[in-house]
Amino acid sequence: MDGLTLFRTHGQTLVEQVMEALRTRIAGRKAAPGTKLPSIRHLADQLGVSRSTVVEAYDRLVAEGVVQSRRGSGFYVAAHLPPFSLSDSGPPLAREIDPLRITRQALDGRHIRANPGCGWLPSSWMPQEEIRRALRSLARAPEAGLTEYGTPLGLPELRGLLSVRMADSGVEAYPDQIMLTESGTQALDLVCRLLLEPGDRVLIDDPCYFNFLALFRAHRVEAIGVRRTPVGPDLDAFEAALEEHRPRLYITNSGPHNPTGTVISPVTCHRILRLAEAHDLLIVEDDIFADFEERPAPRMAAFDGLQRVIQIGSFSKTLSASIRCGYIAARTEWVDALVDLKLATSFGGGAMSAELLLLLLKEGSYRRHVQTMRNRLSGAMNALIPQLEDIGVTPWHRPEAGVFLWCRLPDGVDGAALTRAAWKDGIVLAPGNAFSVSQDYGGFMRFNVAQMAETSPLVDLNMLLQKRASQ
């Protein structure tokens, strides 16, 4: 059990911390049933605790049925473990920075008064009338796939149109290199199933989209964070991580980055691709925010030609979260394997969602909506920044496009504590450490500028900050 460390949780005894470290490693299946655990002396030395502490921790875990004791041989992982649980498979996290709990809160509208921490646009910003009109047209079309499964690769005409759209950012992907999925999340899940094994390591930006971290836990792989800069990952740290950890994948946003709003520079793209070739690294480029950009930022998939880079995307953030349609663009020789994985895990894609998306793209309503959305986001961003600065919240970077503003809170304000207080008032915030492997962003917060413009929670935020400052 190399790399085992204690989780220094307030209020826990050393025995409980040792138990938590072992329990989490076992729950995450990083120690398989029947695996021999470290000896009492070795574990005590590794964790820097007394042998009596380890003895008591092992005894309690035996009583729980998580560990088995074999006379004269030592301690082993129990032969039959409880079902795999995502919430128990990683370090214990406060509710305020747990990706899964944040997602549950943001999606549960019953108690929400304002949602500046969520990752999507307000419903009032979305083209609802255009979607209704397209639904009526689809219902009248005799050839529409209203009751059928989608074809294995997905609707051919839509894949052809996606190929043309990707070419606008320099990515050359033929229609038979594109497979439709039910969402961007499913696209990433399928790529992880294709390329990763439990125990593999994955490079990720620090900070990064928090659901990446939850998905990696589901796949039982280890996320290695690399500090994000305004032009992409810190290249020195990136190279050092490749040499030390030998990861299989690097997963990132090249367009507007979640949560920082940054875009990757051409120089950074070239350097990453050279390092990837030297270290046999594969890259997944999540392009879900591409349509927020007026002028496309560099794409590694364009420089690479889809050799080491896989690009994924969807329309849930720009069109509708209910029209579930995403895609994967990859090397031709990987597409059949991806299709098999899709069929094995979801059988067939949603033909009706694909038909509806195609109709909206072809008739021009989506293009008009996107332009309006960009203008509104730009105005909301320009209006929000000085308002935040007036209450002591400082943008770390001023994005050229997108929906997110990554901000430094006033000195001494902890994002998790602020989030906890806000939730009592029905306000969902997104604290910095929810996005961080290193947990170095306690004083940061991600704001959704569209949601801030829609619900005007600045007064509430200011009151919360003043209350924290007075405590």
Image (cartoon, helix red, strand yellow):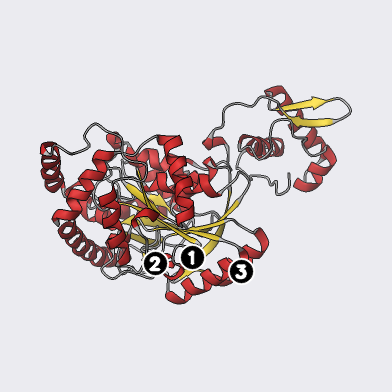
Q: Earlier in the sequence, mark 3 or mark 2?
A: 2
Q: Earlier in the sequence, mark 2 or mark 1?
A: 1
| Whole-percent x, y for residue 374 in the image | 22, 63
| Whole-percent x, y for residue 127 in the image | 16, 50
Where residue 399 sits, quadrant-wise, is: bottom left
Graded by Cα atoms within 10 Å as few (under 14), some (14 to 19) or many (20 or more), the crowding at tag 2 reads many
Which callout, 3 or 2, points to the residue nearer the camera?
A: 3
Name the one closer to the observer, 275 or 404. 275
* Amino acid at dot 2: Thr
Numbered tag placed on residue 262 in the rendering:
2
- Residue name at image x 47 percent, y 71 percent: 269
Can you identify the residue that label 3 sits on?
278
Q: Would residue 268 be found to the left or right of residue 42 on screen?
A: left
Q: Which of marks 1 and 3 is nearer the N terminus?
A: 1
| Whole-percent x, y for residue 391 in the image | 32, 62
- Residue name at image x 18 percent, y 39 percent: 144
| Whole-percent x, y for residue 10 in the image | 60, 42
Q: Are marks 1 and 3 in contact (CB under 8 Å)?
A: no
How many angstroms separate mark 3 from mark 2 (CA)? 26 Å
Where residue 403 sits, quadrant-wise, is: bottom left
Q: Do the residues labelled 3 and 2 touch (CB within 8 Å)?
A: no
Can you identify the residue that label 1 sits on?
228
Q: Are marks 2 and 1 in contact (CB under 8 Å)?
A: yes
